[in-house]
Amino acid sequence: MPTLVPILGDQLSHNLATLRAVAKSDAVILMMEVADEATYVPHHPQKIALFFSAMRHFAEELRAAGWQVDYVRLDDPANTGSLSGEVARAAARWGATRTLAVKAGEWRVLAAQHSWPDVTLLDDDRFLCGIDQFADWAAPRKRLIMEDFYRLMRRQTGLLMDGEQPIGGQWNYDQENRKAVPKGQRFTPPICFAPDAITAEVLALVQARFHNHFGSTASFAWPVTRTQALAALADFIAHRLPGFGDYQDAMVTGEDVLNHSLLSPAINLGLLGPLEVCEAAAAAYHAGAAPLNAVEGFIRQIIGWREYVRGLYWFAGPDYTARNHLDATRPLPALFWGAPTDLKCLSEAVGATGRNAMAHHIQRLMILGNFAMLTGTDPGHVHRWYLAVYADAIEWVEAPNVIGMSQFADGGLMATKPYAAGGAYVNRMSDHCKSCTYDVKQRTGPRACPLNSLYWDFLARHEERLAGNQRLWRMYDGWRRFAPDEQARIRAQAAGFLAGLA
Ligand code: FAD
Ligand code: DLZ
């Protein structure tokens, strides 16, 4: 009797723990396209197409390598629509009494896996830091400071290290990575992968079944195989890594990618390993092809932030996504689903999201996340939106970034202060304000940038909770310097905007 080996949509790695643990002759690999996974939040059609196309290509590769693969398509008339339903059906089909799987990347699916027939669950060892190692690091600490964790990962991997010391003498070059983009600067567009026959078939299926979900598939150009993902990595290293650091936090109207890598979907689905990506970047530094601030900044995102949020997700427990430290209750504003907005920064970020199932980090954090937090939007709604709309969104990585970093809904487990900003920040880091209906310099009045009054109103609303935070004293000092009648005008302006938003 064969062992049933289910492989999930984000487990598309040829070195997956289960593939190392079974003999080809004893195993049936099961891959399942199911409606539940496509709709438990209304995923962007491009994200669904990416998962299905990459899964179908991976199944072909496994077959070519001699594995027996049972692939259930979404449009199979007998498809039960759920992972557990399909595991049960396949177990009966193959007479399998034993299941072997790699633990899923989210609490919800992990819980489902425990109901699979006589299941053995293996740790997902495609990360640099195991869940237990992170827990050992985190448990005795009062604060889970990412920078401390990052240094541990630098030492553990040896990346950009000279013995025990960081190459260049500094661990972190972030202060060099906040430049605004000079006017007229253009960026090399990323390599695109035209849909092949498999992707075209998937796109038609997704269009037919999920056309009512937010987002377009017209620009689909994601790498869907490891070979393509390696080409995307090489393209990034050659053309965008050298400038990655300089404009890491910048935003430019009409530029969706700038110098970002666009590698998160390929890494999160398992087409690329985090270490090989970092080693490629480090090799570019050692070859003199990219500067230290760029390479260190890029590597920090992966061995630092990416590993840190994954550890934190499992450390924090399954109720993490329900946290709501600031008691925010507003439903998600319609503009997140594409309703028109006069705020240029928001329309740019939502527009990119709809077109590409992607927005870069600073748009996610300082435009969309900031707006949601300033307006008092329910973090549960915000979390489900992010999980739905981004091609790289899997709960272990999405939830800490949204609940912790962008909404401060975990009360500071992850971030030392809320990432709150008014219009001045957006104006400093982007060119959006120049073509916006609103005037970024004004706090009140019909043309005042709404972010300004919302920012002060947010601080005032949460004064009791937040004023004691040392990192916010300058902001509260600023608020207290306004005369009482100016404070009242600012708060009335914010109330007017919020009433309109409802
Ligand atoms: P680059 O800017 O080129 O960065 C390189 C790589 O570093 C990324 O590919 C990614 O693997 C990693 N990385 C960078 N920042 C982070 C981070 N904060 N956490 C984890 N990994 C990081 N990333 C996801 O992969 N999935 C998500 O669902 C997701 N949701 C986010 C939600 C919010 C509110 C915020 C603020 C950030 C979120 N991020 C998420 C992190 C980051 O925005 C994306 O990883 C990045 O925008 C992906 O684009 P890129 O590959 O071009 O990244
Ligand atoms: C995101 C996603 C989608 C859209 N569809 C599937 C699917 O049909 N089959 C599957 O195995 N996985 C899918 N996924 C990923 C899962 O929803 C989930 O995020 C990961 O397996 C992590 O647990």
Image (spheres, grey):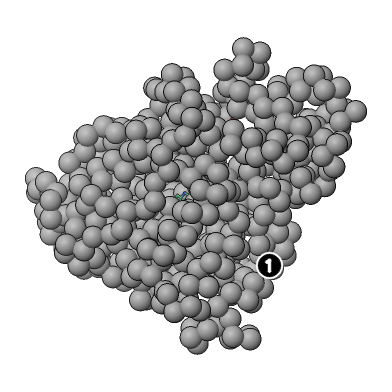
Q: Is residue 261 or residue 461 the one in the foreground?
A: 261
Provide residue 51's location: percent of width, then percent of height: 54, 36
Q: How would you rate the neighbour count of disc 1 (Cα within 10 Å): few for under 14, some for 14-19, many for 20 or more? A: some
- Residue 125: horizontal and vertical position, in percent? 71, 54
Count of numbered labels shown in the rendering: 1
Residue 370 seen in the figure: no
Q: Report which residue position mark 1 lands on.
A: 137
Vertical comparison of 153 with 198: above or below? below
Q: Residue at x 67, y 62 (%)?
A: 129
Provide residue 184's location: percent of width, then percent of height: 16, 62
- 267, 498: nearer the viewer: 267
Horizontally, is 52 left or right of 240 in the view? right
In the rendering, at what x and y percent does residue 138 appear? 66, 64
Q: Tell which of 311 and 122 is nearer to you.
A: 122
Quarter of the N terminus within the rendering: top right
Q: Classify residue 31 by image quadrant.
A: top right
Instruction: Decide if residue 305 is on the left or right side of residue 191.
Output: right
Determine the residue located farthest toward the top in the rendered image.
Answer: 77
Q: Residue at x 19, y 58 (%)?
A: 431
Camera-nearest residue between 470 and 113: 113
Residue at 51% of width from left, 48% of height from top? 228
| Residue 434 in view, yes or no | yes
Residue at image x 22%, y 52%? Answer: 253
The amino acid at mark 1 is Trp
Q: Quadrant of the C terminus?
A: top left
SS under mark 1: helix
In the orientation shown, which residue stands out farthest toward the left? Answer: 446
Looking at the image, is 344 positioned above or below residue 41? below
In the image, is 99 to the left or to the right of 443?
right
